[in-house]
Image (cartoon, rainbow, N blue to C red):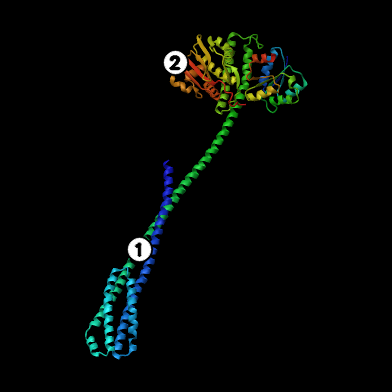
Amino acid sequence: MKILLIDDNESITEMMSKYLTGKGHECIVANDGRNGLTMIEQEKFDVILLDLAMPEFTGVDVIDHLYENGKIKKHKIVLFTASSVTDEEIQKLVKKGAHSCLKKPVKLEVLLKTIGA
Amino acid sequence: MFQVNSYTSWIIIGTLLPIIAFSIVSCVSFISINNLIENENWLSHTFTVIDKADYFMKTMVDAETGQRGYLITGQENFLEPYNSATSQIDDQIKALRQLTMDNPIQQSNMDRLEPLVKKRLDLLDLNISLRKSNNALDIVKNFDTTEGKKTMDEIRQVIENMKNEEQQLLAKRNLDTQSAIHTTEYVIILGTSIAVILTVMTTLVVNKKLAERQKLERANIELQVQSQQLRETDVAKEEFTTMISHELKTPLVTISGYAEMLKEDNSILGPLNSEQIDAVTKISAETTKLERLISDIMDAQKIDLERMKFNKKEFGVKEFLDEQIQTHSKLMSDKKILFVNTTDEKINIVSDQYRLSQVFANLIKNAVDFVPPNHGSIEINAQRKNGHVVFYVKDNGSGIPKEKQDNLFKKFYQVDTSLKRRHGGTGLGLVICKGIVEALGGKIWLESEVGKGTTIFFTLPKNDLNEKYDE
């Protein structure tokens, strides 16, 4: 599976991509929201893992952007957050077309299940 | 209370007494002025009486003089003053009597005067008639007697007495008036002084109270400012906690991720020996505890600020408890704990399923910490009671001493520090449960016996659809 991982924290992206690659997936990393959005527009990914709390261009901005240009339904976007975003906001993002939301720290087992589902 | 009463009575006394004092001063002044006016009237009355008395005496002398001239000359024109005087005398006597009507002494003087005047006038009249009939011998005989002069002297004496009496009365009235004026002066000075002193004192008291009130008002404003600052601090604190929680959780993602990778069978990072696996498992467990601690702090903060949001829906209670059994089954089988749901009736409730599972997670976690190793048992149950659902989580753990039970629902409290070390909790679990249960309209309490176990009960309203939902 081709997975795009958007997170500004390099140790997290390194750990996750190592894990996902080890599980036989192709994992591409974007270290900020704007970069990630460019990649989404250029390539087709099976799953996009999107961190919500990033400086400047956040995960929420990425979702809003995709929602506004109507392309959101084409992607399977799994959000993750370390509780800086409220439950209501997550509900709104899911309504806009995000697949689901995982709370940090994410259990890798759970992450794998969510990607596969 | 005393303060207010004493203050109010001061204002009343301080206002009323000067008014009373000024009223007394006014009355006394009024009476005194009236007295002076009356005295003035009496003064002129006295002088009128004296004048009338003097004039009466002059009239009597005129009558006598006229008679004497006629007697000597025999000419009728000498009788003129006599005639004029006698025609007036009756009126003058009447006037004098009238003027002294109020005075018994003067009336008795008048009683003496009237016969004397009549006697003297009769004598004068007799002499004149004798002269008219040329009876000079009888006249001379008449003149021999001192009867006329004696009567006239008596009249003069009575008139003097009357004048004296009036003078004495005048002196007495003046004396009375003088003392009345003095009294009036004293009353005015004293009354005005009292009024002025009281007014000054009242003003001072009122000013003092006003100053106190202004001080209180200033203190009140300061308190409002401080309270606003505290609210701002609260918001800042919440933002800080959220930020810290985020910062703390981020490294945990990597730590727990690697630990999980290392633990896995056929780990992509290569095989570990059994001791290494044991070490990594401990890292993983501690990471979970740390994460729970961070979440608890966040929730406790939200409960503190009453910012926790609820999303209520209808769901089956028995099914919900079965899910709890499912969720914790791995933990229970690992620790060899008998974990059962003994609910036997079908109950539907409208409440927040997520928050309720949070309550159960905390209560079950506590129970697991306290049950004896290898033969622990935990029972969860729900039953209907008076429009509420009563839930309980019952364990066969060490139990909690009575004196420590009340404190359990207070923040950062554990039964004792040794237990805290043994169980590693944050002390916030029950606080969060209490906050959630109460926010959902229920109550929470516990029954516990040392050595036998603890049961934590809580209620939730069964169907509170009429209540406002938090969005």
Amino acid at pointer 1: Ala
Res. A7 visible in picture: no
Residue placed most toward the observer, B421 or B226: B226
Amino acid at pointer 2: Val
From the image, tell me which residue sits under label 1. B180
Residue placed most toward the observer, A53 or A19: A53
Name the spot of residue A115 as percent of width and height, x first: 69, 15
The residue at the point 33 percent across, 89 percent down is: B76
User: Mark 1 and 2 residues: CB-CB less than 8 Å, in contact?
Assistant: no
Looking at the image, the residue that sits furthest to the front is B133
Q: Does B74 appear above or below A25?
A: below
Name the spot of residue B121 as percent of width and height, x first: 28, 81
Judge left or right: residue B39 versus residue B384.
Answer: left
Name the spot of residue B276 as percent of width and height, x first: 59, 11
* Residue B450: image tag: 2
Looking at the image, the residue that sits furthest to the right is A42
